[in-house]
Amino acid sequence: MTNAPGARSRRASVATFVAAALVPVGLDAGSPAQADTGPGPNGRIAYERFVEHDPPDGFPYSDSDIFSSLPAGTDEVNLTNSERGNEIDPSWSPDGTRLAFASNRDGNYEIFTMGEDGSEVRQVTFLPDGGQASS
Ligand SMILES: [Ca+2]
């Protein structure tokens, strides 16, 4: 990682751009979502919700994952299915092929993108622990 002048402001600019895309729209009454976005061009909505985990060798806990489903709530798919990390605030790309979301899977919240099926996860921001997106 570079410490060149402007690197932090470029990261902040990317985070600001992606964060602006994370504003949820179109809350659907009756949806299983706690917060959702969509439907995107692919006709699916995306949302976060808590998932209960009860590992056989540990204590039960819950965290949030990103799901997608048809607008009626059918055909639900857990796109992130990550343990010990919250995935929140999904937002479709304009062409509906990718989702941006925030996750603290590595300790602090960062911005990620993934394919509409949860594949090809890419980390967009790399903030220091406790870092802020604003300058
Ligand atoms: Ca999770």
Image (cartoon, helix red, strand yellow):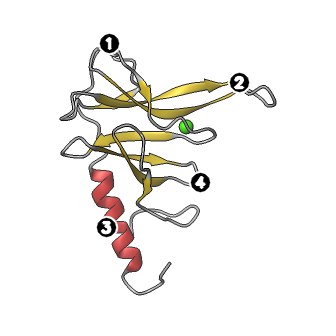
Instruction: Please give the label number shown on residue 13.
Output: 3
Give the total number of marks visible in the rendering.
Answer: 4
**Where is mark 4, residue-wise?**
106
**Disc with the residue nearer the chain's start (1 vs 3):** 3
Compare marks 2 and 1 and give the one earlier in the sequence.
Answer: 1
Q: Can you tell which mark lies on residue 30? A: 1
Residue 29 location, quadrant: top left
Residue at (24, 46) in percent of width and height: 93
Q: Amino acid at mark 3?
A: Ser
- At numbered mark 4, what does the secondary structure look like: helix, strand or loop? loop
Q: Residues under labels 4 and 1: Cα distance? A: 33 Å
Q: Could you tell me residue 62's position as x and y percent?
A: 62, 29
What is the number of the mark on residue 103?
none
> In percent of the image, x 56 and y 26: which residue is there?
51
Q: Residues within 10 Å of mark 1 (few under 14, many from 20)?
A: few
User: Marks 1/3: CA distance?
Assistant: 36 Å
Placement of 92 over or under 45, stated as above or below: below
The alpha-carbon separation of the residues under discs 4 and 3 comes to 21 Å
Which is more N-terminal, label 2 or label 4?
2
Amino acid at dot 1: Gly
Relative to 35, 81 lies left or right:
right
At a point 23% along the width and 40% down the height, the residue shown is: 96
**Alpha carbon distance from label 2 to label 1:** 27 Å
SS of the residue under disc 2? loop
* Contact flag, marks 4 and 2 (Cβ < 8 Å): no
Taking 63 as reference, is 17 above or below it?
Answer: below
Label whose residue precedes the other's in the sequence (4 or 3): 3
**Which amino acid type is marked by label 2?**
Asp
Ligand 1 within 8 Å of disc 2? The answer is no
